[in-house]
Image: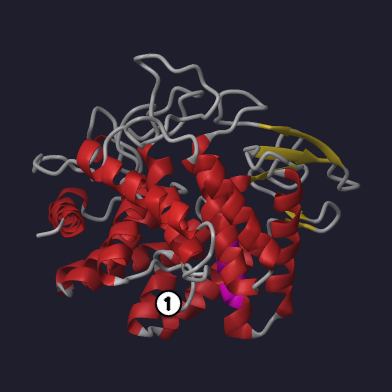
Amino acid sequence: MGLWQQAIEDAVEKTRKNIERYGDLFPHVGEGGKYSNMLNPNTDWTDGFWSGILWLCYEYSKDEAFAQAARRTVDSFRVRLEQHSHLDHHDIGFLYSLSSKAQWMIEGDEAAKQLTIQAADVLMKRWREKGQYIQAWGPEGDPVNGGRIIIDCMMNLPLLYWAYEQTGNEKYKEVAVIHADKSRRFLVRGDDSSYHTFYFDQETGESIRGGTHQGFMDGSTWTRGQAWGIYGFALSYHYTKNPLYLETSLRMARYFLERLPEDNVVYWDFNVPITATTERDSSASAITSAGILELLSHLDANHPERAFLEDGLKRSMEGLVRGYATIGKPDAEGFIEHGSYSVRGGAAPDDFMIWGDYYYLEALVRMEKNIKGYWYER
């Protein structure tokens, strides 16, 4: 059995056990090395990643038990939307792309498709016409967050692109493109690093300053933010074929890969001082690996950057599987150790991250079986 297949089989078996552990609750981040210490009733921004893991396991194994568990999560997401429970943020794409949209893509379930379109409508309510951006957090007019965009949103835009394809309503795509262009201009720096967040005047849309919420400092490069940009701009290119998005993803990927540490799994910020106790973020390396696979799918075989990217992908994934995976630890609930949620905020600075596990598995099944994620129609 090859290394990638071994890692997938391990993740599938752990997921099978986790279905029993979690019931109708959702994992978020680990606490004391266990997701089961931090379960929630579908109230967090991360809950779609559990659905996505279940759907990937089903597509890989064809075991109906995974599909049944995944469908139950979609039922929960339907209730969440009907009640508009904990949806006042921009992470709607994370929630519904990997749950109801995945069900539509795999099973052709029309109700799941309609639920996903309704979710896109919820995300559209974050659009601020005056400022011309999608507000990340908080209510409209919020004095702290009212004018804030964050790079994570690049991974939520595929929901809007997809909704345009399904409905023909140009507004979805128009908003996604305007926000992607603004993110490219203001969140990506001239040296190909990135800000986590950027602030705009809520009335005029005038740019104010870049900053961070989870990075080391305002001018540093939070590694997970860089990862969101790599994958997010590659996905915007998939939908629009705007070559500027492909170039941006490529530049950000080079920046990331040129700064891999000795074991090829990044620390939580590229600018943080490195000591023996500096936290890693394995989830940033997992997201980047999945993003590079998408990026590579758009490059010709003779593209001058292709060999560099393929080498970086191999190094990153081997680093995760050989040094961070819980293979051989049958009681572990997560797939990869040493993820960080918010080192700056003191929240799960070194534990399992459900999004890290999702992107790790997505990258593995894409490499091994060409099973892609759920960001666009296949």
Query: What residue is at 51 percent from the left and 50 percent from the top?
Result: 86
The span shown in magenta is 156-163
Amino acid type shown at disc 1: Ala
Q: Nearer the viewer, residue 322 or 204?
A: 322
Secondary structure at badge 1 equals: helix
> In this image, 332 relative to 115: left or right?
left
**What residue do we see at 33% from left, 82% from top?**
107
Q: How many numbered tags mark residues here?
A: 1
Q: Quadrant of residue 332?
A: top left
Whether residue 34 is situated above or below residue 110 in the rendered picture:
above
Residue at point 32%, 71% (across, down): 371
Residue 56 in the figure: left or right of residue 228: left
268 or 118, nearer to the observer: 268
On the rendered image, what quadrant is the C terminus found in?
bottom left
Q: Residue under circle 1? A: 112
Whether residue 332 is visible, yes or no, is yes
Q: What percent of the width, then of the height, locates residue 132?
A: 81, 56
Residue 191, above or below 5: above
Is any atom of residue 88 visible in this view? Answer: no
In this picture, is 345 found above or below 40?
above
Image quadrant holding the N terminus, namely bottom left
Q: Position of residue 342 (x, y in %)?
A: 47, 30
Residue drawn 48% across and 60% down?
306
Lateral position of residue 80 relative to residue 136, left or right: left
Mark 1 Cα-neighbour bin, 10 Å: few <14, some 14–19, many ≥20: many
Q: Judge from the rendering whether residue 301 lies leftward or rightward of residue 161; answer left or right.
A: left
